[in-house]
Amino acid sequence: MLFRSLDHAWRTRPDCGRCEHPPSSYLSRVYVDTVVHDPGQLRHLIDAHGWDHVVAGSDYPFDMGVDDPAALIEAVPALTAEQKEAIRWQTATHLLDGEQGG
């Protein structure tokens, strides 16, 4: 994963150590969307970031977006109904309301 490389650079290169903590320590502040076009890739994002840090995306109105974001979420293996609802709308609602977490 990219954060392992970033952490290594943070530890070993003076020009990369400008932030106070290793880059991976900020990962809990990062939210990602579902626009990956493949259920396996979306599963990887969920595993890397946590289902409560993934929100539904479409990239609308651009032509490279996902035609059916709900179907993509539905196709991801081993997601509970609670996790799917969080990804579809609950986490985004919390973020828009100024709350953190899913």
Image: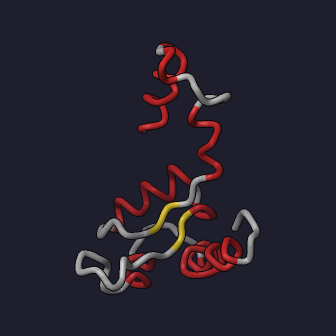
Q: Quarter of the image holding residue 45?
A: bottom left
Q: Residue at x 61, y 75 (%)?
A: 92
Q: Residue at x 35, y 86 (%)?
A: 68
Q: How many marks?
A: 0
In the rendering, at what x and y percent does residue 99 appear?
A: 76, 68
Percent across and percent down for residue 21 are 66, 29
Look at the image and tell me in which quarter the N terminus lies: top left
Residue at 48% from the left image edge and 36% from the top image edge: 3
Q: Please, is residue 43 above or below residue 94 in the view?
A: above
Residue 52 shown left or right of residue 47 in the figure: right
Q: Is residue 80 left or right of residue 6?
A: right
Relative to 41, does residue 37 appear above or below in the rendering? Answer: below
Nearer to us in this view, 26 or 34: 26
Q: Is residue 63 above or below residue 15?
A: below
Scheme of image coloration: secondary structure
Q: Quadrant of the C terminus?
A: bottom right
Most distant residue in the left direction: 63
Please give left or right for residue 27 compared with residue 72 in the image. right
**Could you tell me residue 33's position as x and y percent?**
47, 67
Q: Position of residue 85 (x, y in %)?
A: 60, 80
